[in-house]
Structures are given as C-alpha cells and as structure tokens.
Image (cartoon, helix red, strand yellow):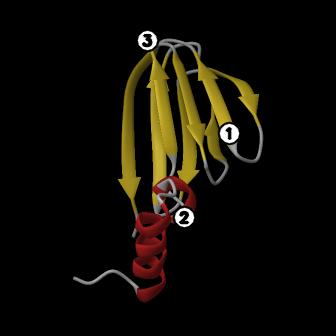
C-alpha cells in the first residue's frame, strides 16, 4: 500500500535535507532512562492520567504506559516527562 502523497513528499524532503523524520513526518520521539523516566516529544496530549496508567495521544494512535506511582514531572505542548517505575509501554495505532 502506497504512502499518502503528502507524507511521501515530506519523507523525500527529510531525506534530501537531512532533517529529523520526527519533525517532518509528525512522528513522536521517545527517550527512556532506566525503568523510571520516560520523555515523549511531539505528543498530541494526555488522554488518561492516573498513578498506574498514563495514555498519551500520538499521530496515528496512542501510547499506554503502565506502572506504579506514575506522575507527570513536566508537561508542555511539545514534551511530556513521566517519572515512576514503568512496567510496560504499549502502542495502539489507529492509522
């Protein structure tokens, strides 16, 4: 199945100019440090927030973080930082 034209063009531009794909293709970027620190860049908002589960909207789906005593250490439009022991990270894609 072919990629939509807009996405294909953005991919070519990214490759041509050496730009990070997470920027040009609206992709999330995640960084995990140990088992208790997660940073998510380019998210689409918090869908659910609790001490045992945090759901984060992503382009084309969502990320589900399960753990114990989870909390948002920082949240801004571009970045979410989650602290607390992480048990699992799952992705549900809708596109």
Q: Residue at 48% across / 83% down in the picture?
A: 6
Is 3 situated left or right of 36 in this image?
A: left
Nearer to the camera, 56 or 7: 7
Q: Residues within 10 Å of mark 3 (few under 14, many from 20)?
A: few
- The answer to whether residue 25 is above or below residue 86 is below
In the picture, residue 71 is in which quadrant? Answer: top right
Between marks 2 and 3, how big is the CA–CA gap? 29 Å
In terms of sequence position, does the residue under pointer 1 or pointer 2 come before the other?
2
Q: Residue at 67% across / 49% down in the picture?
A: 45
In terms of sequence position, does the residue under pointer 3 or pointer 1 come before the other?
3
Q: Position of residue 79 (x, y in %)?
A: 68, 39
Nearer to the camera, 22 or 30: 22
**Number of the label disc, if any, that sits on residue 27:** none
Q: How many marks?
A: 3
- The answer to whether residue 40 is above or below residue 52 is below
Foreground disc of the pair 2, 3 = 2
In terms of sequence position, does the residue under pointer 2 or pointer 3 come before the other?
2
Q: Position of residue 69 (x, y in %)?
A: 58, 13
Outermost residue toward the right in this view: 76
Q: Position of residue 40 (x, y in %)?
A: 57, 37
Kindly identify which residue carries mark 2.
Answer: 24
Q: Secondary structure at mark 3?
A: loop
Q: Secondary structure at mark 2?
A: helix
Q: Are marks 1 and 2 in contact (CB under 8 Å)?
A: no
Kindly identify which residue carries mark 3.
Answer: 34
Kindly identify which residue carries mark 1.
Answer: 79
In the picture, residue 34 is in which quadrant? Answer: top left
Q: Position of residue 64 (x, y in %)?
A: 46, 39
Is 73 situated left or right of 87 in this image?
A: right
Q: Residue at 57% across / 57% down in the picture?
A: 23
Quadrant of the snapshot with the N terminus: bottom left
Between marks 1 and 2, how big is the CA–CA gap? 17 Å
């Amino acid at each position: 199945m072919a990629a939509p034209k807009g996405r294909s063009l953005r991919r070519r531009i990214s490759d041509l100019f050496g730009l990070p794909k997470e920027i040009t293709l609206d992709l999330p970027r995640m960084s995990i440090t140990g088992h208790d620190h997660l940073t998510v860049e380019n998210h689409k908002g918090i869908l659910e927030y609790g001490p045992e589960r945090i759901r984060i909207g992503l382009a084309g789906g969502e990320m589900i973080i399960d753990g114990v005593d989870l909390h948002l250490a920082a949240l801004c439009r571009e970045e979410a930082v989650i602290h607390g022991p992480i048990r699992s990270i799952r992705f549900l894609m809708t596109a």
